[in-house]
Image (cartoon, grey):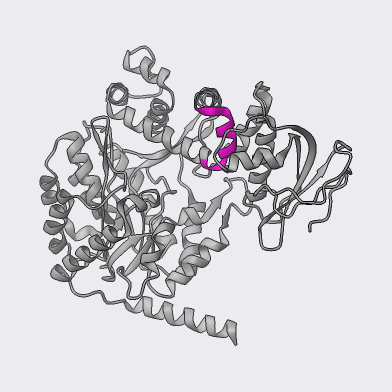
């Protein structure tokens, strides 16, 4: 199994800069698992500038997939916070597959557990996680997704879908339910969780991601219109 | 390579933003190459079924298959992984052969899967194999198993590498020649990978071409790239550079078993390269093909597949 250990160590050189630096310095080589030739090869690779290109490509690919799957979450986090959180997340979550939807869902759950004090983040993470669950490859229809919003989802999602960071979105606790219709399209239904507004709106919210929603002042999920 | 491939001509790697080229009549390509893995989801070894096809993607491939051959170029096998050999992936390729009856298929001579602490890790990029006898002994029986499981010629692509394992027991040409001879696989000769490796590691690409047994070459890849941090990247981000045209012009007439030349451009770069420039390169490729090799002639196996497809469609509409 020496070759398997060598390949494992080669991948770790790309994923883990601390490991790379220790190997390059001769401080950390899994010598008992590698033969002398493999050990020497690993140390040369750790010192090779081409390794940095592999790391750049690896991170760029992984980051690109995540940004594509969670565009609103990434926008609310902002570049610096996103990089910080991803660095922490990736430290404990090595990439397992070319299919990144499960990783994006795991990142959503991880962000929720982090309890970051960042306005709108919980709403947006819950919304995008639900969207991914509807898109997840499965043999049967996906279960209905319920998303509890604290802020007005119409205004919040409209701002994000226009490429803006949301500002000044009013609080408006409500629940949105999502399911997939016969054509495979996500259909969202919105209703106010409590009688927050004294007069229910007769107009459906116009946010592009809440197509066909109906708003009612009730806890029940409304039929889709 | 144990059998010559059908001579298809010039192909284009499938990307949705290139649809205008695939759907044009007359069409500038003779076949479409596709990374089939993007049209299914691998839910993991424990899932049943493990692979779920994307219906829309498969329908698009069937639509194209009615007009031209579809050639799969997979990214998922990781045939060089010491810790993994994914027979489920091979079975999925064979299922796709049942749907698209491709004339050959290919993957990468590299690895991207490893194990760490009992957990599978996917590097997401193709990593180099040591050019040693140990690697050949790992690869050859696996290639033979692929050939038994998917009864179509199987090609492996020479890898691009930004760091090398440079003390191998063989040089790259000797390693590739030996692998093809011992396993019976063909070579997908990626000339842009060769150009990239030559630039980044300072060797003469012509010397490697002269040392290769070009009778093993079943397909050629061409592409463009870009510079980053002092390296040239195989980014599939541009038109075909002059250096790659030079390599192609030398190589093309020396490959007696060649099935096709495929141009690769990633979808995210199509707009900046421009469809007009991509078409221009495709026409230049077709001119080179016509100059050096007989005109594309669809092989009997394709004709049968096409007739069966049409018959099936007629039954469905009857």
Q: Is residue A6 visible?
A: yes
Image location of residue B276, percent across then percent down? 29, 61
* Number of callouts: 0
- At horizontal 27% and vertical 48% (from top left) the residue drawn is B158
Image location of residue B119, percent across then percent down? 54, 32
**Does the magenta portion include A75?**
yes
Image location of residue B268, percent across then percent down? 40, 48
Q: Is residue B81 visible?
A: no
Q: Is residue B231 above or below residue B77?
A: above
Q: Is residue A178 above or below residue B8?
A: above
Residue toward you, A117 or B182: A117
What segment carries the magenta color?
A68-79
Q: Residue A180 falls in which quadrant of the image?
A: bottom right
Residue toward you, B44 or A139: A139
Residue toward you, A24 or B233: B233
Position of residue B122 in the picture relative to residue A152 (left or right)? left
**Does the magenta portion include B229?**
no
Q: Main secondary structure of the magenta part?
A: helix
């Amino acid at each position: 199994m020496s070759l398997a250990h060598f390949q494992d160590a080669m991948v770790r050189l790309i994923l883990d800069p601390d490991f790379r630096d220790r190997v390059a310095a001769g401080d950390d080589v899994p010598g008992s698992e590698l033969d002398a030739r493999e050990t020497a090869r690993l140390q040369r690779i750790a010192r090779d500038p081409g390794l940095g290109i592999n790391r750049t490509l690896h991170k760029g690919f992984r980051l690109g997939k995540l940004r594509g799957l969670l565009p609103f979450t990434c926008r609310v986090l902002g570049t610096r916070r996103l990089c910080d959180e991803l660095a922490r997340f990736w430290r404990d979550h090595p990439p397992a597959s070319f299919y990144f939807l499960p990783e994006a869902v795991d990142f959503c759950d991880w962000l929720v557990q982090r309890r970051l004090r960042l306005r709108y983040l919980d709403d947006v993470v819950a919304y995008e996680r639900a969207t991914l669950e509807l898109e997840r490859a499965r043999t049967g229809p996906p279960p209905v997704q319920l998303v509890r919003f604290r802020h007005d989802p119409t205004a919040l999602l409209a701002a994000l879908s226009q490429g803006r960071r949301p500002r000044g979105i009013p609080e408006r606790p409500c629940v949105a339910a999502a399911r997939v219709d016969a054509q495979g399209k996500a259909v969202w239904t919105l209703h106010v969780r409590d009688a927050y507004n004294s007069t229910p709106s007769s107009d459906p919210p116009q946010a592009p991601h809440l197509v066909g929603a109906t708003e009612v002042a009730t806890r029940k999920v409304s039929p889709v219109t | 390579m144990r059998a010559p491939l059908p001579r298809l001509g010039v192909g284009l790697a499938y990307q949705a933003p290139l649809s205008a080229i695939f759907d044009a009549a007359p069409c500038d390509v003779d076949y479409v190459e596709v990374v089939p893995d993007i049209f299914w989801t691998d839910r993991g070894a424990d899932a049943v079924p493990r692979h779920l096809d994307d219906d829309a993607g498969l329908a698009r491939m069937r639509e194209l298959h009615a007009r031209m051959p579809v050639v799969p170029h997979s990214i998922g096998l990781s045939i060089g992984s010491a810790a993994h050999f994914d027979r489920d992936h091979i079975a999925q390729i064979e299922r796709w052969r049942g749907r698209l009856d491709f004339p050959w298929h290919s993957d990468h001579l590299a690895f991207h899967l490893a194990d760490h602490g009992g957990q599978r890790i996917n590097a997401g990029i193709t990593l180099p194999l040591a050019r040693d006898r140990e690697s050949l002994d790992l690869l050859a029986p696996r290639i033979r198993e692929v050939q038994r499981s998917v009864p179509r010629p199987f090609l492996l692509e020479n890898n691009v590498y930004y760091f090398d394992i440079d003390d191998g027991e063989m040089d790259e040409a000797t390693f590739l020649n030996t692998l093809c001879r011992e396993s019976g696989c063909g070579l997908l000769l990626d000339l842009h990978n060769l150009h990239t490796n030559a630039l980044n590691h300072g060797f003469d690409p012509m010397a490697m071409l002269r040392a290769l047994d070009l009778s093993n070459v079943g397909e050629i890849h061409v592409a463009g790239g870009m510079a980053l941090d002092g390296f040239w990247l195989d980014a599939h981000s541009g038109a075909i550079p002059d250096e790659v045209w030079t390599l192609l012009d030398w190589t093309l007439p020396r490959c007696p078993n060649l099935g096709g030349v495929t141009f690769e451009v990633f979808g995210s770069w199509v707009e900046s390269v421009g469809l007009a420039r991509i078409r221009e390169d495709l026409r230049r490729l077709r001119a080179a093909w016509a100059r050096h090799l007989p005109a594309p002639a669809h092989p009997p196996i394709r004709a049968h597949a096409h007739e069966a497809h049409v018959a099936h469609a007629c039954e469905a509409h009857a």
